[in-house]
Amino acid sequence: MSDRKHVLIYTDGGSLGNPGPGGYGAVVIYKDKRKEITGGFRLTTNNRMEITAAIEGLSTLKENCKVTLYTDSQYLVNSIMKGWAKKWKSNGWKRNKKDKAVNVDLWEKLLALLDKHDVEFKWLKGHAGHIENELCDKLSKQSASSRDLPVDPGYKPDEV
């Protein structure tokens, strides 16, 4: 049996318009401890916020952990669990012979975090009453609606 901590992370991200102001939320749970994380950008996409939520949640971990990460983003789950992101990276960030992968800056960060932790991504149906997912959705919407949001340094409008 592993002596690593088993952490649960719930994430959600979205944008008000796509692209538009965006936000992310994550809830990190270990035993009876929990941490809520949220933030946003003035112009971004929903997929960027979904990936950012996972990055921010995983970034809170101070040691190598076993993680179950729940998200309502099939894009995020499939990109990791089906190996798409690793394949894009090995192909010079190309999805196929002619199409470039998008959100490369975020995939690089997420893949580096996945090298540090044993993470299983699990899909949850969004807006289905799951308490932690609903909280993440609320956090992401609150952040997206905030004033004076910073610029998303990796957002490239031509990649939408």
Image (cartoon, grey):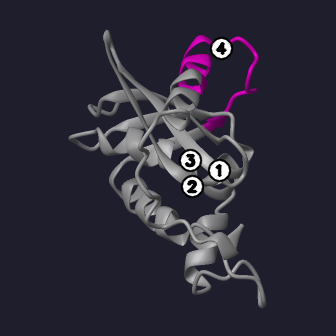
Give residue 33's position: percent from left, percent from top. Answer: 29, 14
Mark positioned earlier in the residue sequence (1 or 2): 1
Can you give x and y, in whole percent of width and height, for residue 131 in the image?
59, 11
Residue type indicated by callout 3: Met
Quadrant placement of the C terminus: bottom right
Q: Amino acid at mark 2?
A: Leu
The CA distance from mark 4 to mark 3 is 20 Å
State the extent of the magenta-drawn residues as a range.
Answer: 122-137
Could you say which disc has been placed on residue 130 in the image? 4
Q: What residue is rendered at 30% in x and 29% in y?
A: 5
108 on left or right of 97: left
**Labels 1 and 3 touching (C-beta < 8 A):** no
What residue did someone put label 3 on? 49
Q: Is residue 11 visible?
A: no
**Quick one: label 4 or label 2, which is nearer the N terminus?**
2
Which residue is located at x 67 percent, y 82 percent? 94
- Say which quadrant the N terminus sits in: top left
CA separation, marks 3 and 2?
Answer: 11 Å
Q: Residue at x 54, y 71 (%)?
A: 104
- The nearer-to-camera label among 1 and 4 is 1
Mark toward the start of the polypeptide (1 vs 3) = 1
Of badges 3 and 2, the one in the foreground is: 2
Instruction: State whether residue 68 is above or below residue 110.
Output: above
Residue 43, numbered circle = 2
- What crowding class fits label 2: few (fewer than 14 Cα within 10 Å), some (14-19), or many (20 or more)? many
Q: Residues within 10 Å of mark 3 (few under 14, many from 20)?
A: many
* C-alpha span from label 4 to label 2: 28 Å
> Label 1, label 3: how many angstroms apart (C-alpha)?
11 Å
Do callouts 1 and 4 mark residues in contact (Cβ within 8 Å)? no
- As drawn, the residue found furthest toward the left would be 62
Q: Identify the mark nearer the N-term, 3 or 2.
A: 2
